[in-house]
Image: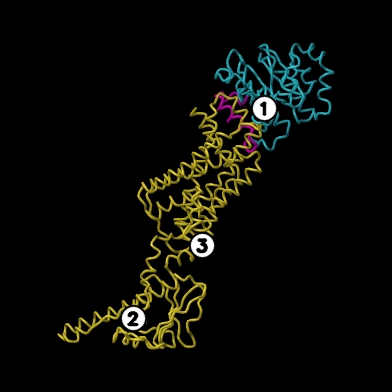
Chain colours: A cyan, B yellow
Amino acid sequence: MRYRGASRNALEGLSLEIRSGSFFGLLGPNGAGKTTLISFLCGQIEGSCDEARILGCSRHDGYYRNRLGYAPQEIALYPSLSVLENLNFFSRLLRTPCSETERVLEWTGLSARAGDRVATLSGGMKRRLNLGVALLNRPALLVLDEPTVGIDPESRQFILDKIKSLRTDGLTLIYSTHYFEEVRALCDEVGILHEGRLLDCGPRETVLGKNEERYFELTKGMPS
Amino acid sequence: MIRGTALMFVNELRLLVKDRQALALLFVMPLALIIFLTLALRDVYLDKLGRNIPIRLVGPSDTGECGEPAKVCGRLVTELKRLGHDVKIVASTGSNGGSPRGGIAVVLPADPEELVNVLRRSAEVSLPSTARIRLVYDPALDHSVRAMVQGHVLLAMQTILIELARGEVKELVDRGDIPRLSRSVIPQLTRFEDLVTEEAAGGFILPNPVQQGVPAWALFGMFFIVIPIAASQIRDRETGIFRRLLSFPVPRSSLLAGKLLAYLLINIVQFLLMFEAGTRLLPLITGSPMPIQFRATSLAAVTLASAAAATSYGLMVSSLARTAEQSSAFGSLSVVILAVLGGVMVPMFVMPPFMQAIAQVSPIYWGIEAYQDVILRQAAFPVIAGKIAILLAFAAIFSLISILRFRWSEA
């Protein structure tokens, strides 16, 4: 997988299997290819090899798309619209019932701010809403790309607790981050990505125990 | 697919309605330009049309009176007014008519009745300088306007002479005075000044301020749709909204079509608003009617084609630009250049031939031409269809470039 005009592959020789119902941590320093892999899985970009089977479907299958929840790294919301208007718009595109909007409002703890413009929310609230939109269709696979980037520790903990609470729903989670401790706290399987290649993959304790020093070496000097 | 397109369409409109800067850019700016520039250029256009040129007629009396309507001076006033001039009579004492700023003065000889008698006596007469009609004009006044007024004065005098001759002929016929009837002649004043060709030299019809200004400034505003389109595309690209939408079970074509249809609608609303302002509001402000005749179907076709060209241009700029700043700077600058070339700021009939040739690279030029075919020349649809086809060709080229360079994400 190579971007137009790039000198090297963004992903290369990557083979990965994620167990249904697991919380999979995709760990890697900045520029490792995490977002590229997620974009590929979510059908946003094409690669030279298109053999991904997700929930038993191809990436472009409507059934899969209907059961996929995705929260990008950026705050992918309309700042000039209210919280409720944002949720309603995405909900209608996903053809989910109105009750899901109410559920997500409660889940994010933003019911009291439903009429407020997104631009007026704090960074942590925007992150929660960004995450909430991904849950509108009660996904079977939830893909979160660095959902705690740029927020204060308190908000980060709130979001991590919220994500943990999703485990009871039986969904599969792909959680991309460069925070080692988040993967340790949240995931039961881990894959470490570096320069487009998968360095290691397997159960959390095995992979993290084996690669902790190496990972910190890789991320040394990188902004957190 | 239709549902996705419709949802994107409604959402894009909702976002636009909340964007006050974009609304001001799209509606207030062209509306203000139409009103203020039409008012500012009103006299320029009217002068070019040869209407409403203020004439100061310096009468024969010391009091500024022109005498009875039957007298030459009175008749001259009537004829000049009939030819569309605003005539103001001033006293002759100590005045040669002055040098009216932007206007023209017609100074009559001391005895206009005698002038007419001299003219009637012989067609070969050489008039003494004291018996001539003098035109005193502002040196800045356009030559064609001076020539036209001179021609109108001569035409008015000729009309007066013809009327007098007709009366004389009738009287001689009534009296049966055949020998004198055969000697009766009507002096040919046109041999003094050959203005007939100058009057016809214009040939084409010059637009009035509304006919020129409304389509031009409306198109200018319509092409400024580039700013909100680019802002929207780049925002959705930078904030990951596009990436999120791409993970939804909605075709990509629906996502894009919904957004663009919203801007197409905004373009149409823009034109309708500008057109209404030009045809209803401006005559109220200026107090002078500026009638426009058009076929609604032709107007709708040109508006749709222009909106397609403007919207696809906006999409192309947003596809080529990497940042919102780039799109804003390039978008504004390029629209202003296209507008200047296309004849928005300077009407096409004022431009030299080489500029008129260059103008054809601008879709705005074809938009103005098509609109003027509809509302000014009342051209047949096949004539308009050619220009609509060119506008649609521009839209196709812009769309093709957009497709080749479109990016859903920053990566």
Label disc, if present, on residue B69 of the rendered structure: 2
* Three-letter amino acid code of the residue under disc 2: Pro
Percent coordinates x, y for residue A90 in the rendering: 59, 28
* Three-letter amino acid code of the residue under disc 3: Leu
Residue labelled with disc 3: B39
Residue at (54%, 59%) from the top-left corner? B36
Q: Are marks 2 and 3 in contact (CB under 8 Å)?
A: no
Q: Is residue B222 magenta?
A: no
Disc 1 to disc 3, C-alpha distance? 52 Å
Answer left or right for B233 relative to A199. left
Corner quadrant of residue B17: top right
Q: Establish if B316 lies above or below B82.
A: above
Disc 2 to disc 3, C-alpha distance? 35 Å
Q: Residues within 10 Å of mark 3 (few under 14, many from 20)?
A: some
Mark 2 belongs to chain: B
Region in magenta: A76-102
Front-most of B405 and B336?
B405
Quarter placement of the C terminus of chain B: top right
Front-most of B243 and A198?
A198
Corner quadrant of residue B297: top left
Residue labelled with disc 1: A72
Q: Are marks 2 and 3 on the same chain?
A: yes
Q: Establish if B209 lies above or below A178.
A: below
Mark 2 residue element: loop
Front-most of B119 and A202?
B119
Between disc 2 and disc 3, whose residue precedes? 3
